[in-house]
Image (cartoon, helix red, strand yellow):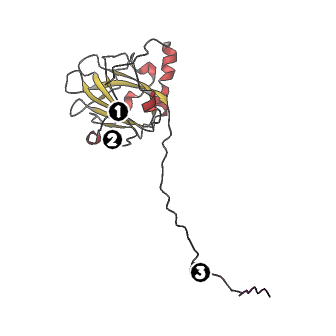
Amino acid sequence: MSGHRCCEDEHEPAERGLEYALYQRIDVEKLQCLNEAREGDGKLVFKPWDQRTDGEKFVESDADEELLFNIPVKLKGIVIAGEDGESHPAEMRLYKNITHMSFDTCREPEEVFRLNRDPLAQLEYLTRVARFSNVNHLSVHISRNFGTEYTRVYYIGLRGEYSQAHRHELTICNYEVSANPADHKVDSIIPQTNVIS
């Protein structure tokens, strides 16, 4: 399990905001959030850096403390802000290349982070570059919080590269080893004989 590998205060705030502009490349219509209390609220936490502390736009878990986000993106680092209290996420699990992951299909994560309370989104959790260099789809599982029945998230900032999802299709080809004359219609056949005397 990873703690946070933090790069806090390495960059000026304006530069840091540019690093977390990956939200602009997310197709929010394809973004999926499971266990959200209100449908569509999961999309609200992917917003500009300067709006990260806006408490008006948030997602809250419904049946229990877990949330699961499915996002098409390549990742280098992640920032998460929640309520400054027990509903702040305490653990985050990252999965790659599972396009429609659900709570039932969770498996061993690529990386797990124990989170600190960070209502201002100042701590960055750096992913292991080798594990997340070839990612077409990212799933973020908020598996627990600091001790209440629901989890509230105000902001998720992603730093990385946009990756266009590729659809790989199967092509089935049939090749003839020898031609079947019935498959090839010829108007007329002129017999030829080559005789050498």
Q: Spatial distance from mark 1 to mark 2, Cα to Cα?
A: 15 Å
Q: Main secondary structure of the magenta part?
A: loop
**Residue 8 painted magenta:** no
In the rendered view of the protein, which quadrant contains the N terminus? top left
Q: Amino acid at mark 1?
A: Gly
Q: Left or right of 127: which side holds 92?
A: left
Q: Left or right of 28: which side holds 86?
A: left
Q: 170 or 65, which lies in front?
A: 170
| Residue in the picture at 55% in, 67% down | 175
Question: What residue would you read off at disc 2?
Answer: 101
Question: What residue would you read off at disc 1?
Answer: 42
Tell me which corner region of the image, top left, top right, bottom left or bottom right, holds residue 43.
top left
Q: Spatial distance from mark 1 to mark 3, Cα to Cα?
A: 62 Å
Q: Amino acid at mark 3?
A: Pro
- Mark whose residue sits in front, 2 or 3: 3
| Residue in the picture at 48% in, 50% down | 168
Element under disc 2 = loop
Circle number at residue 117: none
| Residue in the picture at 26% in, 42% down | 104
Question: What residue would you read off at disc 3?
Answer: 181
Element under disc 1 = helix
Residue 146: percent from the left, percent from the top?
23, 21
Q: 42 or 190, which lies in front?
A: 190
Residue 192: percent from the left, percent from the top?
73, 86
Q: Residue furthest right?
A: 197
Residue 189: percent from the left, percent from the top?
68, 86
Q: 129 or 77, which lies in front?
A: 129
In the rendered view of the protein, which quadrant contains the C terminus? bottom right
**Residue 187 painted magenta:** yes
- Mark whose residue sits in front, 1 or 3: 3
